[in-house]
Amino acid sequence: MSYLVLARKWRPQTFDDVVGQEHITRTLERAINKNRIAHAYLFTGPRGIGKTTTARILAKALNCLDSDKPTSHPCNKCISCIEITDGRSTDVLEIDGASHRGIDDARELQTNIQYATSGRYKVIIIDEVHMLTKEAFNSLLKTLEEPPANVVFVFATTEPDQVPLTIISRCQRFDFRRVSPKLISRHIRKIAKNENFDITDDAADFIAIRADGAVRDSLSMLDQIFASEPEQIDVELVMSLLGVVPVQSFQRIAESVGSKDPSLALTELADLLEHGIDPLQIGKGLVEHFRNALIAKSNAMDKDYPNYELYAKIASARSLQDLLRIMRVLTDSYNRMRRSDTPRYIMEETSIYLALIDDVVDVSQLIQTVRSGDFDTPVHREKVSQSQKPAPQVSKRAAPISQTDEQKGIFNSQKPNIEKQRSASIPDESSDEEKLPDDPKERFLTVLMSMHKAMAGLLKHIEIILDDRRVLLKFPESMETVREELMVNSEQFKLLKQSAWKAFGPDVEIDLVREKNVPQKKPLNKENSNIPEQVEEILNIFDAKLEG
């Protein structure tokens, strides 16, 4: 007898043998026991999870001769069960929807179901039913709705969305699920033990994860490993025989992200390519690796998940926003690689980009940083280090002025040291007034910038004029809330007066007036006109840019 592959040798023969689909098998068993047998079923779900197998078991349950009526536990010993198992029963007709998809095939099927059966039921199993043409579906409608009393249709498909609703509405639909890695791993260890092979738990877990929920795929991989007649099956052997990239290689590439040293990632990448690993496999593996790290970062990964420690290590070193950004980069690169004739070059480009990538700073965090006056961020520290200029000698920066009622009252959260600023702002005849701009508005803002950068950034959008010895700050109607708050906040108002004294002399007065029908101010940056001005100002302060 010729060799029988594991996927066929270990195909389930009863409902109890089906792995991971108890929600379906239990329902079918109860329906059979209570004689509530439908005339049409629709089995949907991914490949290799038991749709066609369950359809065959249903056929045996309906026609088992060991019982005088349909039974939920077929004997698998009577003539009917054996013939159905071997695929030679005249009462069970299996049709491939991809090769028998036309209206002529549908008409021939309608003719065949009129013939008498040797058993209780004639079971029509159509695999990949979504491949039938529209005309073939329409031809089956009447027969499907009112078939002969002893005919049962079972449709199986991986793409239920392509099956017409008129067909679905005439069927009982059962959605098969991907099988969990734990159940597949347990099934693999059971088969290995019966086949007299020694397999480690880690190796079985690795195969189960690679199967991605498909039991048949796991058995195909296991069959390939058994063919090498190994003394013991461990993870290293599985990776070697299946041509899978070791997870440690992905980990080394992951550790090079943000290192500013592209050679680390390129060296590891070159080593994998020299061992014949396909660049597409590397790209897909990196997407999967960082996806697992993202799940671990979200606290949604079981601690007994294979290589959990490695994923947790990446998760602890990076923020959730960083991992999301890296995932977007890798996913985009993988899609480009699939369409390219030179996927290696794209993989190398991506490795360099990831090595040079900076940490993500959320816009809301930047806004909060400006509000709190704490500019001690990595971006700011790097900018100061490069310029080698000391920070402005201001004791504390106050919160930025908001133009919304929601942010009203934020001036009270920060109180600059007015006494120190007063002494610093008293004009000195020997000071460098000559360096201040001649334009009154620019002159005032330059002084205010050195004392309160956030306030100066906002006031540059209003009209500022010098009328004799009076400085007028004209606020448009849209900034009336800001004007009122500056007037009632004595310390902030004193700060404006200090700036005016230093810019124009100690005898000037300052007035905050309301101006109607002020023309709308233009965006700060024409290229970023769709970005809110407050956000753009924050980006300018930190010399940053938006990603994604």
Image (cartoon, rainbow, N blue to C red):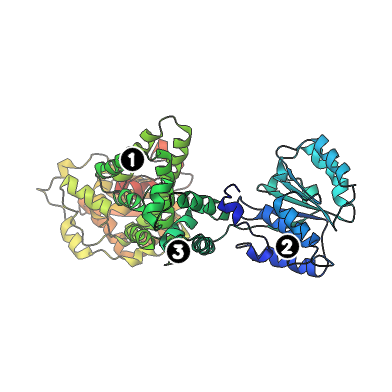
User: Along the polypeptide, which appears first: circle 3 or circle 1?
Assistant: 1
| 160 horizontally vs 531: left or right | right
User: Can you give x and y, in whole percent of width and height, for residue 355 in the image?
Assistant: 30, 45
Q: Which residue is mark 2?
A: 77
Please identify the residue farthest to the top as the structure is shown.
341
Query: Is residue 111 among the parts visible in the rendering?
Result: yes
Q: Are marks 2 and 1 in contact (CB under 8 Å)?
A: no
Q: Residues within 10 Å of mark 2 (few under 14, many from 20)?
A: few
Query: Is residue 504 among the parts visible in the rendering?
Result: no
Q: Secondary structure at mark 2?
A: loop
Residue drawn at x 75%, y 53% as measured from the top left = 83
Up/down of 323 relative to 355, above or below:
below
Q: Are marks 2 and 3 in contact (CB under 8 Å)?
A: no
Q: Which residue is mark 1?
A: 275
Up/down of 100 relative to 10, above or below:
above
Q: Which mark is in front, 3 or 1?
A: 1
